[in-house]
Image (cartoon, rainbow, N blue to C red):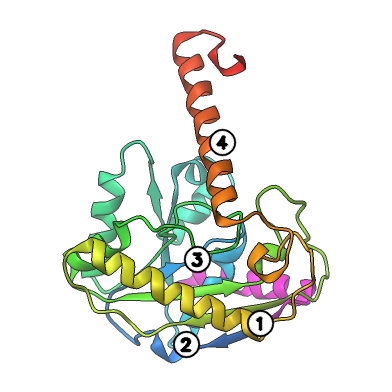
Amino acid sequence: MEPVYRTIIGLARTVFFLEGLKFTVTGDENIPASGGAVLAVNHTGYMDFTYAGLPVRTPKRYIRFMAKSEVFDNKIAGPIMRALKHIPVDRAAGADSYKAAVDYLRRGELIGVYPEATISRSFEIKDLKSGAARMAIEAGVPIIPITIWGAQRVWTKGHPKRLGRTNTPISIAVGTPIQPYEPASELTAELKTAMQELLRGLQEDYVHEPGAYWVPARLGGGAPTLEEADAMDAAEAAERAARKRAELTGSDDAGA
């Protein structure tokens, strides 16, 4: 029994109801009833981690998400994240969080990861980091791909949040578990292919508004292409690094 987690789930479902969100979940039978697994989730919006928990409730299980450490520093969110046994990730020193995730997996937990590492502005599957594959290999557990479509309409990077009653349809697909094997690079490539196939399957049955910001360019939408989005991410990362250098040196590099 996890009373805090159960309470949070109840609150989340109340919010979903008030927002009028319409969920379609397929493949939840692929979530194991017991034992560890890495749940690899695509990342299109700030709220999709709350939706990713829906399929695992079929076998009445919980996800321990790996989340950036800044969330744990928040006075409100931090205590909740720790109570839910999520794992803080320091991007500058990730060894401790990686070890904690592997330990959780060996103890039979479900670990949720975003292998794209950041929100995909194009809403396509970005290149994946190898951490999910390496964890699965080290712990000897499967990777389960999960894709969510529609979450970007609620709240995503660079666009206003829509947290009122929007009646937004959100589709979730859980793929077949992928058993771990080496090298991690090949396992990562297989995971990416699986996530792409799941995503396209969800998109086939979804009504897309031509030109809308939340629709990929490939489907006639206004989102940037994957290449354009990658360039935006690179520019943002460079700006962030310049600001950090300026803070450390006391110079004005960030504004140069």
Residue under label 3: 42
Q: Nearer the viewer, mark 1 or mark 3?
A: 3
Q: Nearer the viewer, residue 94 or 2?
A: 94
> Which residue type carries mark 3?
Asn
Whether tag 1 and tag 3 are in contact, CB under 8 A, the answer is no
Q: Earlier in the sequence, mark 4 or mark 1?
A: 1
Q: Which residue is mark 1?
A: 23
**Amino acid at the residue labelled 4:** Glu
| Left or right of residue 160: residue 149 | left
Q: Earlier in the sequence, mark 3 or mark 2?
A: 2
Q: Which amino acid lies under the numbered mark 1 shown in the image of this protein?
A: Phe
Q: Is residue 214 above or below residue 91?
A: below
Q: Is residue 63 visible?
A: yes
Callout 2 crowding tier (Cα within 10 Å): few <14, some 14–19, many ≥20: some
User: Do the CB atoms of the residues marked 2 and 1 lie less than 8 Å apart?
Assistant: no
In the rendered image, the quadrant that contains the N terminus is bottom left
Residue 39 vs residue 158, the one in the foreground = 158
Whether residue 14 appears in magenta in the rendering, the answer is yes
Residue at position x 31%, y 44% in the image: 94
Please state which of residues 89 and 84 is positioned toward the viewer in this rendering: 89
Q: Earlier in the sequence, mark 1 or mark 3?
A: 1
Per the image, the residue denoted by label 4 is 236
In percent of the image, x 50 and y 16: which residue is there? 247
* Disc 1 crowd, CA 10 A, few/some/many (<14, 14-19, 20+): some
- Give the foreground label among 4 and 1: 4
Task: Report x, y in % for residue 133.
Answer: 27, 64
Please state the extent of the stretch shown in magenta in the rendering: 1-22
Asked where in the image residue 115 lies, by quadrant, the reply is: bottom left
Element at badge 1? strand
In front: label 4 or label 3 = 4
SS for callout 3: loop
